[in-house]
Image (tube, rainbow, N blue to C red):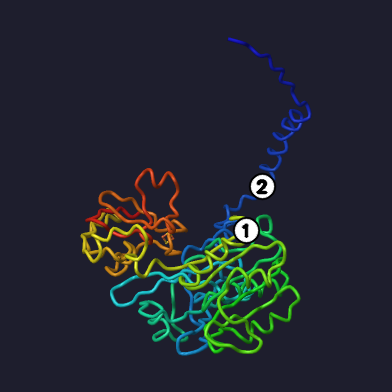
Amino acid sequence: MSRKKFIVRSNFTDIANFAKMIPTRSKMLDSGSPAPVPATYPINELAKLIHPGRMKLKIDRIVEHSDNVKSFILVSAEGKKLAPFRAGQYLTVQLKIGSSVLTRPYSIASTPQNARDGFYNITVKRVPDGFASGWMLDNLKPGDELTAFSPEGTFVYEPIRDAKTVVGIAGGSGITPFLSLAGSIADGSCKAELVLLYGARNADEIIFREELDKLNQNDKIKVVYVLSDSNEEGYEKGFIDAKLIQKYAPEHYSIFLCGPKAMYEFAEKEIEKLGIRKKNVRFELFASASKPEAIPGFPMDKAGLTFRLTVRQFGKETQIECLSHESVLVALERAGIEAPARCRSGECGFCRSKLVSGEVFIPSNTDGRRIADVKFGYIHPCSSYPMSDLTIKID
Ligand code: FES
């Protein structure tokens, strides 16, 4: 066995300083106030503001863009400061509809500065056959209160990771995180530049037209409208493909995409053709698959089957039904079981639960679990489909 010699030299300055700390501390203790320790400290207050857990919000007003799209302007129902967020993040609202308790994430359309001024804007578009969006549009009114969770999400500009210019690809209500980003570029709080390619079927479907036209006048922001179903002067015609991206993008750029699933599937292939590094591509896609049977790898012999789901939560065991074509999270919500959830797309990990027994199908493109969770049998119920009777444990 070989031996090595190390010489450890003392740092006398450190030792001398350390020795001085004792009398200094004693003096501070002697001169301390006899008053009781304060109940709160500024740093704790700040932590609570940034991570409030739940917030009680009130609908201050509603902006109607059309019968199928409305913006809800939300303020604190308790007169508190709103949790800060970064442009591109989302707010998860909790809804009680009949006997169901469900959550829905919505990108915040307003800017971080607006939150400091006391409001958030979330914009809701009716999803055909959607449960929550239609209910929100048809039932919510000014003065109604909602519970929301702290803003979350990684669809944000990172100066160290991203190129100076973001090429944003938006479709439908997927414009909202870009509106927030553009707003914060315009107010100087974000140092990025934005080329925004906004796809719609026709000009009437463009949401926030007035705001976007105004932002387009800023020399750091360029907005290009792309219409798939109509040919009009001043608009690009067709779909947002690799050629169109190259036409407007500078030499170096990051790509951010937020839009409906069909657009995501099309654009994903087009973006691949551009050969951009993965770290410079970001997708925001809320919602689990509407037709999981269409996902490659779905076991077709299980299509349309009903299983028993045993839920262990807070020391209680509940049994409910779950269908193979709906996610475990949807089954929980339908049964009125309050399950933690935020993104609903397998990414954030908030719904992480232990799969005690049974089998689930997890589409590979929404499997955001950590390696250790895969190994130790945890699932994300929002992106897991029952393939047998199941038992899960929710923390
Ligand atoms: S809610 Fe985000 S991973 Fe399930």
Q: Quadrant of residue 147?
A: bottom left
Q: Earlier in the sequence, mark 1 or mark 2?
A: 2
Q: Position of residue 119 (x, y in %)?
A: 57, 77
Q: Position of residue 17 (x, y in %)?
A: 75, 33
Q: Residue at x 70, y 71 (%)?
A: 185
Tag 2's secondary structure? loop
Asked whether, in this view, residue 149 is left or right of residue 329, the answer is right
Q: Position of residue 122 (x, y in %)?
A: 52, 77
Q: Which residue is mark 2?
A: 32
Asked whether, in this view, residue 85 is left or right of residue 392, the answer is right
| CB at disc 1 and ligand 1 closer than 8 Å | no
Asked if one can make out residue 120 in the rendered structure from this viewpoint, the answer is: no
Identify which residue, 382 or 271, lies in the foreground. Answer: 271
Q: Residue at x 65, y 50 (%)?
A: 33
**Residue 342 versus residue 262 in the image, above or below:** above
**Residue 209 versus residue 267 in the image, above or below:** below
Asked if one can make out residue 169 in the rendered structure from this viewpoint, the answer is: yes
**Residue 85 versus residue 121 in the image, above or below:** above
Q: Which mark is residue 276?
A: 1
Mark 1: few, some, or many residues within 10 Å (few <14, many ≥20)? some
Q: Position of residue 302 (x, y in %)?
A: 24, 60
Q: Quadrant of residue 213?
A: bottom right
Q: Quadrant of ligand 1?
A: bottom left
Q: Residue at x 76, y 76 (%)?
A: 219
Identify which residue, 323 or 391, lies in the foreground. Answer: 323
Farthest residue toward the right? 13
Tag 1's secondary structure? loop
Amino acid bearing label 1? Ile
| CB at disc 2 and ligand 1 closer than 8 Å | no
